[in-house]
Amino acid sequence: MIKYIEAPYYLDLLDNFLKTNLPEWAALAIEYVLIGLVLLTAYAVIALALIYVERKVTGFFQARLGPNRVGPFGIIQSVADMIKILLKEIIRIDNVDKFLFYLAPFFMIVSSFLTFGALPFGRGLHVVDFDNGIFYLIAVSSLSIIGVLLAGWASNNKYSMIGAMRSGAQFISYELSAAMALMTIVVLTGTMKLSTIVDQQEYVYHWNIFRGHIPAVIAFVIYLIAGHAETNRGPFDLPEAESELTAGYHTEYSGLQFGFYYLAEYLNMFIIAGIATTVFLGGWQPIQVEGWDGFNTAMNFIPSFVWFFGKTGFLVMLSLWVRWTFPRLRIDQLLNLEWKYLLPINMVNLILMVIIVIYGLYIH
C-alpha cells in the first residue's frame, strides 16, 4: 500500500524555499497571503462554475439550451455576469439603517468564506485543521443568519422583513437537524477533527456512510435535507419567494452588495456538499478495497483533490435535481417537516448510533 506525505511535494518545496531565503516571519507572512489569495480565487471560480452548471442543468430539466452565446457552449456567461455586477451602481436607499444595511452582506460572505477555508480539499490541501473541526464548521456557518436578519431589519421594507423572519425560523430549525446528523458521525468516529475523520475512511467499506450501518445512512439523508434547507434553495426557498416577496431579505440590495448574497448562496451549496463528502463519503480518499493492491495503486494515481471535487460535484448535482423537481413548500409544511419528523428521527438515530458504538457493532 502506498503511503503519503502530509502535503504535496510542491508545497513542501515552496515552504523550504521561502524559509531558506527569508526570515521565518517573512516566509510565514508570504505563505499566509498566498493561501488567502488561493482561497479567494477558488471561492470565486467555484461560484462562477456552479452558476453556469445550474443554468445548464435548469435548461436540461426545462427542455431548453441554457447559456449558449458568450463563449463556447456559453461557458463565459458567468464571467460576463460577474463583470456586469461589479460595474453595477449600488443604489442608495432612503430610510434604511445605513450601518446595519451595509454591514449585513459582509456577515454572509465572511461566514461562507470561513467555512469554505476549513474544508480539506485534498491530501495536504487543508488550510486549518482544528481538533474541534466539526464544531467550528457548525459555529461559523451559523453566522450567516445574522446577515440575513440584519438585512431584513435594516432595509425598512416589509418584503425584506418577512423574508428575513422566514429565513431565521427556517435556518435555526434545520440547523438542529444538520448538527445532530454530524454529531451522529462524531459518535461513530470518536473525534471532531476533520483530518482524522478522513483518515479513518481509507477503504470504501470504512466510509462512514457504510461503516455506521443504517443510522449513518439516515444521518446522511437528514444532513442533505437540512443542509439544502439552510441554503434557502428550492423547494425550501420561502425566504426568497419571488412570487410573494420580490427577492426576500435582499430585495433592496443592488450591485456588489447583492452579489455577495448571490455568491454566498452558491458557495453554501458547495460547502454543504463538501462537508457531507468529508464526513460521510471518505473526503478526498480514493476508492480503495483492502487486498486489491493493483486496483488501489491505479486509484491512487488520480489526485486526491479530484476525488474530493468529484464526490462533492455528485452531491451538488443531486441538490440541483431536487431543486428543479419539487415544488415550493408552504411555511407550515417546512417547519412541520423539521420539528415533527426530522428532529425526532435524528434524536432516535443518535441513540442508535451510541448503542452501535458501545457494543462495537460498526465496521472496524
Image (cartoon, helix red, strand yellow):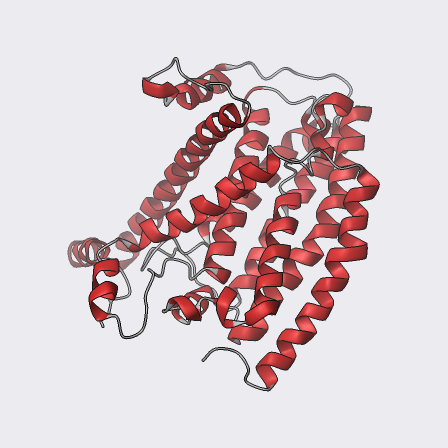
Residue 189 visible somewhere in the drawing: yes
* Residue 80 place in picture, x, y as percent: 41, 17
Q: Is residue 142 visible?
A: no
| x, y percent for residue 133 | 51, 63
Q: How many labels, in total?
A: 0
In-image side of 118 versus 252 (left or right) = left
Instruction: Give the quarter of the figure containing the C terminus.
Output: bottom left
Q: Give the x, y percent position of residue 192.
A: 53, 69
Tell me: residue 52, above or below residue 27.
Answer: above
Q: Quadrant of residue 155?
A: top right
Of 241 and 260, the residue lying toward us: 241
For residue 46, which quarter of the picture? top left
Residue at 61% in and 68% down: 215
Residue at the location (55% across, 23% down)?
A: 62
Residue at horizontal 66 percent and vertical 44 percent from the top: 229
Q: Position of residue 345 (x, y in %)?
A: 73, 63
Q: Is residue 224 left or right of residue 81?
A: right
Relative to 25, residue 164 above or below:
above
- In which quadrant of the rendered view does residue 27 lie? bottom left
Quadrant the N terminus occupies: bottom left
Side of 192 where 242 appears, left or right = right
Q: Is residue 94 above or below residue 193?
A: above
Residue furthest front in the image: 63
